[in-house]
């Protein structure tokens, strides 16, 4: 009925290559992966949201990831 899928997330944190495994019943999006990595690596995560009346060059979650040194996030099905 429901299948649990495993995903491997490769990324860099402050330039250091790292890898994380994530499980989900639904496909994992890039944004979900970044949120999980922020929760893991940031001691006091802050909530961020984009205001609908302002134009943003970069979405808040991606901007926050860059601020803390998170980059090159890639989500792949685990083998």
Image: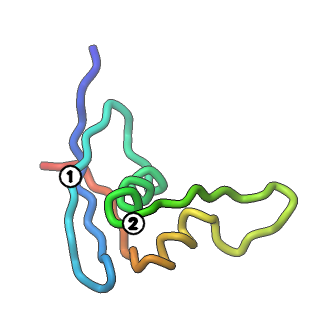
Which residue is at a point 21% across and 71% down the rendered structure image?
18
Foreground: 40 or 16?
Answer: 40
Foreground: 68 or 62?
Answer: 68
Foreground: 50 or 47?
Answer: 47
Q: Report the side of 48 relative to 71 (left or right).
A: right
Looking at this view, name the residue that lies furthest to the top.
1
Q: CA distance from mark 2 to mark 1?
A: 18 Å
- Residue 30, by quadrant, is bottom left
Looking at this view, name the residue that lies furthest to the left.
79
Circle 2 residues within 10 Å: few <14, some 14–19, many ≥20: few
Give the image location of residue 13, x and y in percent.
31, 77
Give the image location of residue 66, x and y in percent.
49, 77
Which residue is at a point 31% across and 36% down the rendered structure image?
24
Which residue is at a point 21% across and 42% down the rendered structure image?
6
Looking at this view, name the residue that lies furthest to the right.
53
**Residue underneath mark 2:** 42
**Residue underneath mark 1:** 21
Quarter of the rendering occupied by the N terminus: top left
Is there CB contact under 8 Å for labels 2 and 1?
A: no
Looking at this view, name the residue that lies furthest to the bottom.
15
Circle 1 residues within 10 Å: few <14, some 14–19, many ≥20: some
Q: Nearer the viewer, mark 2 or mark 1?
A: 2
Give the image location of residue 60, x and y in percent.
62, 65
Give the image location of residue 57, x and y in percent.
71, 75
Q: Report the side of 76 relative to 66 (left or right).
A: left
- Whichever of labels 2 and 1 marks the residue nearer the N terminus, that label is 1
Element class at badge 2: loop
Which residue is at a point 71% across and 59% down the rendered structure image?
50
Element class at badge 1: strand
- Residue 53, by quadrant, is bottom right
């Amino acid at each position: 009925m429901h299948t649990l899928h495993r995903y491997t997330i490769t990324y860099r944190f402050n330039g250091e290559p790292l890898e994380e495994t994530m499980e989900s019943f639904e496909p994992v999006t890039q944004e979900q992966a970044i949120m999980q990595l922020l929760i893991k690596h940031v001691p006091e995560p802050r909530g961020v949201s984009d205001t609908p009346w302002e134009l943003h060059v970069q979405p808040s979650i991606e901007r926050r990831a860059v601020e803390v040194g998170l980059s090159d996030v890639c989500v792949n099905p685990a083998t």
